[in-house]
Amino acid sequence: MEVKTVCLGMLTDGPASGYDLKKQFESTFGHFYSAGYGSIYPALSSLAENGFVTCEHIPQDGKPDRKVYEITSFGRTCLLNLLDDPEPGHKIRSDFLATMWFAHLMTNDQVEAVLDSLVSKIEFQHKLITDIQATYAHEWPAGKCFVAGFGKTMAAAIKKYVEDNRHMLADDVAQKTAAG
Amino acid sequence: MEVKTVCLGMLTDGPASGYDLKKQFESTFGHFYSAGYGSIYPALSSLAENGFVTCEHIPQDGKPDRKVYEITSFGRTCLLNLLDDPEPGHKIRSDFLATMWFAHLMTNDQVEAVLDSLVSKIEFQHKLITDIQATYAHEWPAGKCFVAGFGKTMAAAIKKYVEDNRHMLADDVAQKTAAG
DNA sequence: ATCCCCATGTAATTTGTTACATGATTGA
DNA sequence: TCAATCATGTAACAAATTACATGGGGAT
């Protein structure tokens, strides 16, 4: 699913600016989808050009005009078609796991540092989702609750797996050292 | 981490062709990193051009020459540097979760179909890792065991989460129907 | 017959990332 | 005074995906 489609979907919750959408990409979508301004702004322009959304320019003092986008009924219809894929992807691109695959080529300290970094990122992610849930979950439809719960469950599973199994890696390095 | 680096790393297990590496991307790397021929062949050419690997052309009858690549000691040194990043990424790009985020815009049947598709993909992935473990785990260093275990644990956690929580989504659609 | 496996590669296209460019307001 | 927040956008670049192009051998 491209950034365009996600932006269009986000606008079903009400009108918003590119800046607003970026915040949503960082918060609620942070654990499964990312997009920067360089993708969002062109996506919104393109959506507006093609009549999926309308754009209202709101002048502000000292800042560029705030451009608030609103989904059109045409946009809504198209969104439903775009969401219709019965087999949406779920892809992991993990440099972390790729690195661990080659752990035997690294020093114990390097491996430990990588593991620590992952755990702290995952803890941050878990906390972020928890905070967002506390604020918004009461007004969310089931799908959003499902997604947030998914993120927390994965974060918890990753943390537990790493903590339960990181000793394997240390042991392996120790053996290398003993053998070498 | 780019495809080039992963290919270089794979070659530390011994000489291999692009075709061989592709199989590895589909099997052991399947759950966390993907690459097609369109990325792999150019990556190997580039590695050879820059002296990270050597290439032996093995003539075959009826088929194109098999090109077997072997890592050089220079390539090995560079690989260690490339693996040195203490904060490797771990990114999810989930059209599945994005779709579920908008579940309230979809019909119950659509949501169910998406969920079924994910579960069957995840089951396939879990089985694939299990089969590979059965064949290779005894000769694997700890890092590879860690990565395979990670994949299985995630697959199991996803399956359980979806099965335990999919009723939420059905209920939500039922409410929509009752309300509309 | 037909399909899958073997085996390589290029080129066009799509997509996204990063760096650049600007600049006022607000709170610590 | 310094960092963060607000607010937009373009252009260059990097990277990967997809489609195209070829073709024999072996199994069912």
Image (spheres, coloured by chain):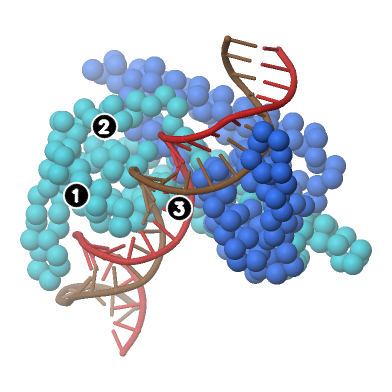
Chain colours: A blue, B cyan, C red, D brown
Secondary structure of the residue carrying tag 3 is helix
Identify which residue is drawn at 71% across, 35% down. A61
Q: Residues within 10 Å of mark 1 (few under 14, many from 20)?
A: some
Identify which residue is drawn at 16% across, 31% down. B74
- Residue A99 lies, in percent from the top left, at 38, 33
| Image quadrant in which the N terminus of chain B is located | top left
Q: Nearer the viewer, mark 1 or mark 2?
A: 1
Secondary structure of the residue carrying tag 2 is helix
Q: Residues within 10 Å of mark 2 (few under 14, many from 20)?
A: many
B76 vs A103, nearest the viewer = B76
Amino acid under disc 3:
Leu
Real-space Cα separation, disc 1 to disc 2, in angstroms: 16 Å
* Cβ atoms under marks 1 and 3 closer than 8 Å: no
* Cβ atoms under marks 3 and 2 closer than 8 Å: no
Real-space Cα separation, disc 3 to disc 2, in angstroms: 28 Å
Residue that numbered label 3 is attached to: B128
Identify which residue is drawn at 33% across, 20% down. A107
Q: Residues within 10 Å of mark 3 (few under 14, many from 20)?
A: some
- Residue B122 lies, in percent from the top left, at 55, 53
Dot 1 or dot 3, earlier in sequence: 1
Q: What mark, if any, has residue A178 been given in the picture?
A: none
Hey, which quadrant is residue B7 in on the image?
A: top left
Real-space Cα separation, disc 1 to disc 3, in angstroms: 30 Å
Dot 3 or dot 2, earlier in sequence: 2
Residue that numbered label 1 is attached to: B45
Secondary structure of the residue carrying tag 1 is helix
Residue that numbered label 2 is attached to: B79
Q: Chain of mark 2?
A: B
Identify which residue is drawn at 84% across, 45% down. A139
Does residue B144 appear in the picture of this structure? Answer: no
